[in-house]
Amino acid sequence: MSSSKNVDVLIIGSGGAGLSLALKLADHSIRVAVLSKFALTDGSTYYAQGGISAVFDADDSIESHIEDTLDAGAGLCNPEIVRLTVTHGKSSIDWLRQQGVVFTEEKNESGEKILHLNREGGHSHRRIVHTADATGKAVSLSLIERAREHENIELLEHHNVIELITRPIPGQAAKQIVGAYVLDSKQQQVKTLSARVVVLATGGASKVYLYSTNPQSATGDGIALAWRAGCRVSNMEFMQFHPTCLYHPNAQSFLISEAVRGEGGKLILPDGSPFMQRFDPRAELAPRDIVARAIDHEIKKRGIDCVYLDISYKPESLIREHFPTIYDTCLKFGIDITQQPIPVVPSAHYTCGGVLTDSYARTDIANLYAIGECASTGLSSARS
């Protein structure tokens, strides 16, 4: 049994990318439906810890951020897309604050409140805007609240897309998107949703790995949907591994934020000796791929189960203020991070590839767009 519905824009995915787009479109009187495979908070955005990079410090610059990004990308990034992303960083943070996201602040020398900036691997300056160590949760809850309030947005939880619907463009060999077949898993009913525009914002595919920092929903659905519909995908071999996932049999791949290393956390072997200086002069603040490979090398070379991340030498007040979620979670597993190092291993974290798009998020199919982690932005925006 099926039912049908018509909207202007159908957004598949309720994370940061999907909800941000929904709110911006809805403000222009566009009717938007946002689909979530499970609950609205079950995506990767909600679980993100560290923060969002943007240039705020007076000693920092757009050019420095671009240089750091290209360096961390080992020359494989599209410079046009890097510049586009970096130059919109500050305005994107400002927009999130307007939506109600409260980021951690501190007082400057004049006593004025300013954003507190963390530093993470690959960055030459402090430029990570954050909400303690639960940035994604703050962003997700604020955007969900704004979306629930908006009269032009309909939120459909527990709606899983089965297939995209396309049809030929009259007089052309190409085709266009017209909607999607969707399973309402609560009602066990298939719905046909028609839309002028469909946007994939379905996140990554890191749950294809046994050890991942991602929630169960990160199974690459949007990438597969686009591929079956006839879109190209690219760069799927580039899967980012986060260097520091909590190593504990009951932890279910709990992430230890990169900001711990940014605040001085040291990676050590079981005997307490450091090792990152042998792999990169930036040591713990090298880009993620370098740190993850170094940890993997030491684990295999020495036949050990894990390495350790030690920030216990820092003041307890700093640790508990900056990393309350990590502190509380580790304590549940009998690890007091103010007194002892954290056992860590690398874990699949971010899908760098995805549905091939241009800088306007356009795919190979007319009126089908892809944004966020499921997209791989590599085409020139000048294409027709």
Image (spheres, grey):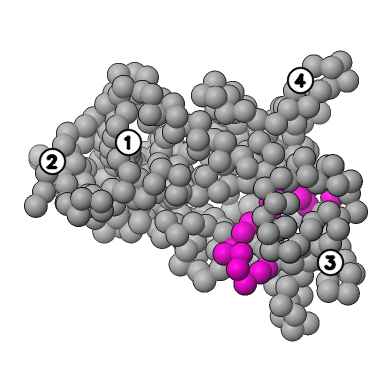
Task: Name the disc covering residue 268, or none.
Answer: 3
Check disc 4 and give the amino acid type: Lys
Query: How far apart are the two marked residues, 3 and 2, measured between alpha carbons?
Result: 57 Å
Question: Dot 3: what SS?
Answer: strand
Amino acid on which the number 2 mark rests in the picture: Ser
Res 157 visible: yes
The location of residue 75, given as percent across then percent down, is 63, 53
Secondary structure at numbered mark 1: strand
Horizontally, is 5 left or right of 317 in the view?
Answer: left
Task: Quote the CA–CA distance across marks 4 and 1.
Answer: 35 Å
Q: How many labels does the image show?
A: 4
- How packed is label 4: few (under 14 Cα within 10 Å), some, or many (20 or more)? few
Q: Could you say which is closer to the camera, residue 367 or residue 311?
A: 311
Residue found at the far bottom of this picture: 303
Badge number at residue 113:
4
The magenta stretch is 247-264
Dots 4 and 2: beta carbons under 8 Å?
no
Q: Please, is residue 196 above or below residue 328 in the view?
A: above
